[in-house]
Image (tube, grey):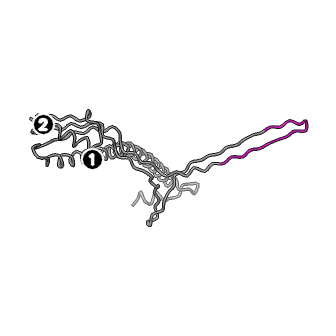
Amino acid sequence: MKWFDRLFKKGEDGTRVELWYVVIILALGVIIFTFANKNITESEVDNIQPSIDTVNTSKTISYEERLESRLEDTISNIHGVGKVDILLTIESSKEIVLNKDVPSGESIMEEKDSSGGSRNSTDKTQSEETVLTNNPDGSSEPIVLKETMPIVQGVLILAENGDDPIVKETLTNAAVILLDIPAHKVQVVKMK
């Protein structure tokens, strides 16, 4: 308790000298803690950004995998095909077109001077703003006009009976119809 009594003891000039030391040490501690916390926050932000990209990529991959799975289930039910494995290549990712409000205006000013000369000036303004809708929970989200799913660039079909010309033609035709791609982008091969 001696240190506690000494901490609050007045100095010769009436000030608490040791108390100022404590205040200074506490202030330095707060400053160090603030900067240390700020650095952690910045590093956490750096770690979050790659995970956002990963989420967007995984959505595209899951669409691709889901489409491959549906095709495998459908094509494996065709008579004489046997077991199949399908690999798709995707050309582009999903595209979302948002509703935009594009107000524009035009003003024309005509000036005439005393000597009979005239000058015309035109001022055009245009701005673009995304149209939002309010949800019952109080949040707002943009109005989506159109969503375009990823485009299939090509397909490889591995089939148990992929060497049979009839099976090959049937699988090629099925892929052309289901994926809306030309026949030259479909390859059917025999599975090991």
Q: Is residue 180 left or right of residue 102?
A: left
Q: What amino acid type is highlighted by mark number 1?
A: Ser
Q: Is residue 165 left or right of residue 109?
A: left
The question of residue 116 being in magenta is answered with: yes
Residue 178 found in image quarter: top left
Residue shown at 75% from the left, 40% from the top: 121
Q: Residue 114: percent from the left, percent from the top?
A: 91, 38
Q: Residue furthest bottom?
A: 136
> What label sits on residue 158 in the rendered view?
none
> As rendered, which of 150 and 40 lies closer to the eye?
150
Identify the secondary structure beneath mark 1: helix
Report the magenta stretch's main SS. Answer: strand
The question of residue 113 being in magenta is answered with: yes
Residue shown at 45% from the left, 48% from the top: 97
Q: What amino acid type is highlighted by mark number 2?
A: Gly
Dot 1 corresponds to which residue? 62
Q: Residue 22: percent from the left, percent from the top?
A: 47, 53
Dot 2 corresponds to which residue? 162
Q: Quadrant of the C terminus?
A: top left
Q: Nearer the viewer, mark 2 or mark 1?
A: 2
CA gap, disc 2 and disc 1:
27 Å
Q: Residues within 10 Å of mark 1 (few under 14, many from 20)?
A: few
Q: Which residues are magenta?
A: 105-119
Identify the secondary structure beneath mark 2: loop
Q: Residue 106: percent from the left, percent from the top?
A: 68, 46
Residue shown at 25% from the left, 40% from the top: 176
